[in-house]
Amino acid sequence: MVLLESTDNALQAAHAIALRTAETVTAGPRRLYTALVATGLEVAREKQYSYKITEVTFFAPAESVALSIGCHVSSLYRWLPTLTALNLVAAKGHFCTHNGQTKQDGTVWTVKFRQSDKRVRVGFDWLKKSYRCLGADIDAGRTAWQQIRESKSTTEKATINLHYCLRWALSAFSQKPVTNDPRFSKRFDLASIFDVPAVPKQSRPEKIFEAAKAISSALNDNGSHRFYMAVLWGLTKLRDRGAGDYFGTLHMMISRCAADVLEGFAHDGNGGALLVSRLKSAELWDEIMKT
């Protein structure tokens, strides 16, 4: 089981996708696939790709990806063939010219979100792009090896920390050198669901409005904002009267529904009906409707 260090929906969704798509592989390759899928989902959001996208290509040094999943880069290269054989991941070294010599400055990854007959590959155009200025990064100490030196030596092997590879994958192509921190677009975070019962009662309407927006965004269901507000109010009232705290259950349901939307299992790319069916199957629906 992967220990989720972040509550961000991308990592939750990637975990669900990996458990379903790469369920037959061992823990190491599955953890690598989870991190690559989560990075791909973040890139897709940042670049505002269609919700129907089934694969994403991005740049990140292999050492940084290995650091994100708490393993040595040799382990990454040992696990990668398992994912390429399943037609889930393709990886190609990216080269640049530094001091008159050809150097590999990182890796270009293409990651599929579900298995299909279409062959996964790294397009030639992606290999021609310029992702960083290697000389400037070396001079400024912004390299993958510097990341490794600065990271904690006690990194938990079961923990995924996307920061190390996102700083590269989310950097603008023209940005030279890359920044130290990943660049996040403004978007609603599903973690706001957990804030609803934690804020004072007078602040709940605003927090519920925000959390409902997060749910609408995650499920690609912007027309049901008021319905999600009603669900959150129902769960809040249940909790207030001691009938149970179901916010964690809701968060997990939405994360899995969001993964299904990305994989094409939701009708018209809308996850609202999926969520309702799962609320009903969990016997939460009647309790929510009563409130």
Image (cartoon, rainbow, N blue to C red):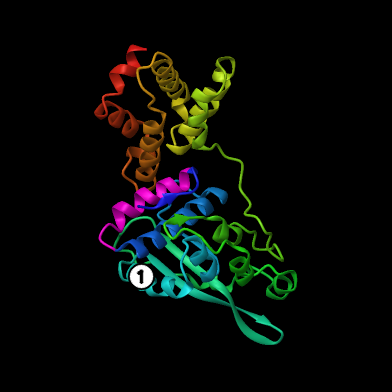
Q: Residues within 10 Å of mark 1 (few under 14, many from 20)?
A: some
Residue 220 place in picture, x, y as percent: 44, 37
Quadrant in the rendering for residue 254: top left
Does residue 140 appear left or right of residue 73 in this picture? right
Residue 273 place in picture, x, y as percent: 33, 31
What is the three-letter code of the residue carrying label 1?
Answer: Thr
Q: Is residue 52 visible?
A: no
Residue shown at 46% from the left, 61% from the top: 69
Q: Which residues are magenta?
A: 9-25
Furthest toward the front, the residue is 154
Residue shown at 38% from the left, 74% from the top: 78
Magenta stretch: dominant SS?
helix
On screen, residue 199 above or below 157:
above
**Does the magenta portion include 262?**
no
**Does the magenta portion include 22?**
yes
Quadrant location of the C terminus? Answer: top left
Residue 198 place in picture, x, y as percent: 52, 25
Identify the residue under disc 1: 84
